[in-house]
Amino acid sequence: MRLPSWITQHLAALRALLVLTVVLGIAYPLVITGVAQIPGLKHNADGSMVKVGDTTVGSALLGQSFTDKDGNPLVQYFQSRPSAAGDGYDPTSSSASNLGPESVVDTLPDPSVKGDTGTQSLLTQVCSRSLAVGKLEGVDGSRPFCTPDGVGAVLAVFHQNGATGPVTRAVSLNQACPTTPFITTYQGVKVECAQFGADYSKGVVTPIRGNAPANPAVPADAVTASASGLDPQISVAYADLQAPRVARERDTSLANVKKVISQYTDGRALGFMGESAVNVLQMNLQLDKLYPYHQS
């Protein structure tokens, strides 16, 4: 007896589903898993895990923080770049801050809410990080468009005719009262501190460059998070900036620390793509091995 065409079509589809399930859902994964366990490939396939003795301390492919329980940098270690993944370097929450170059105005903390810290703009995050890194490394942490106290140097400038005409008022948007504004006057008008809840939307948002050097001492990757939030590497410039501190804390020479930096520096991809970078975890572990830290 000949089956109806719609039944034969469904049977053919079922056979195709079963064959593809066996080939692509069972056989292919088993083959790939088997290939991945070949010596020389197994380490990478297992996540490039790094061990000290029998203890897994991280992955060479994922960044991590080197801080104490309060989030303060451990001075004997090279520090990683900032991370916006979860609470920092959370591989289950890989992400960026999604803040762009126009993110320059903070949301001020509500003084009536205990513990409210407001929301920092990207500019203020960069400014505060640069100030902190500069203090840690003993260098000038100032940057263009940043105030001396580490927030974005941004004014709301009010003009007589809306966006034009003489300036009638200027407010430092990221400095909540009673903070003293980073500049006293703007075009002859006294600069005010910002009041929480006040409406400054009619003012022209005006970043002020300030007197910081065009090439800050603190590199860009020390103050900005990567797109993934999981970068295991830092720039050579950031490693070089931290080297004197690490050498001092480990009671060894700067030359010895520079050798470790060089040992764990990867060159540009294919010789011309990107920039050279240093693996922070591997470098710190090598320093622990060669020049152990003894807390005084």
Image (cartoon, rainbow, N blue to C red):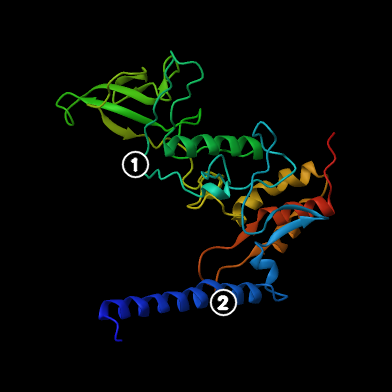
Looking at the rendered structure, the secondary structure element under dot 1 is loop
Badge 2 or badge 1: first in the primary sequence: 2
How many numbered marks, from 0 up? 2
Q: Is residue 241 left or right of residue 11?
A: right
* Image-quadrant location for residue 48: bottom right
Q: In which quarter of the view is residue 295 placed? A: top right
153 left or right of 224?
left
Q: Provide residue 135's location: percent of width, then percent of height.
A: 62, 34
Q: Quadrant of the N terminus?
A: bottom left
Q: Is residue 61 above or below residue 80?
A: below
Circle 2 SS class: helix
Label 2 is placed on what type of residue?
Answer: Ala
Camera-side residue: 79 or 191?
79
Q: Farthest residue in the front direction?
A: 1
| Residue in the picture at 29% in, 26% down | 187
Residue occupying image coordinates x 65% and y 37%: 136
Q: Residues within 10 Å of mark 2 (few under 14, many from 20)?
A: few
Horizontal relation, residue 229 to residue 190: left or right: right
Task: Work out which residue is located at the far left of the displayed protein and give it.
Answer: 161
Residue indicated by mark 1: 102
| 147 versus 260 height, above or below | above
Residue name at image x 33 percent, y 18 percent: 197
- Measured as percent of width and height from the top left, residue 114 is found at 49, 15
Mark 1 residue type: Glu
Q: Compute the Cα span from label 2 to label 1.
A: 51 Å
Q: Is residue 92 left or right of residue 4?
A: right
In percent of width and height, residue 124 lies at 45, 34
Residue 201 is labelled as none
Residue 139 placement: quadrant: top right
- Name the residue carrying label 2: 27
Q: Residue at x 23, y 25 (%)?
A: 158
Which of 101/170 is in front? Answer: 101
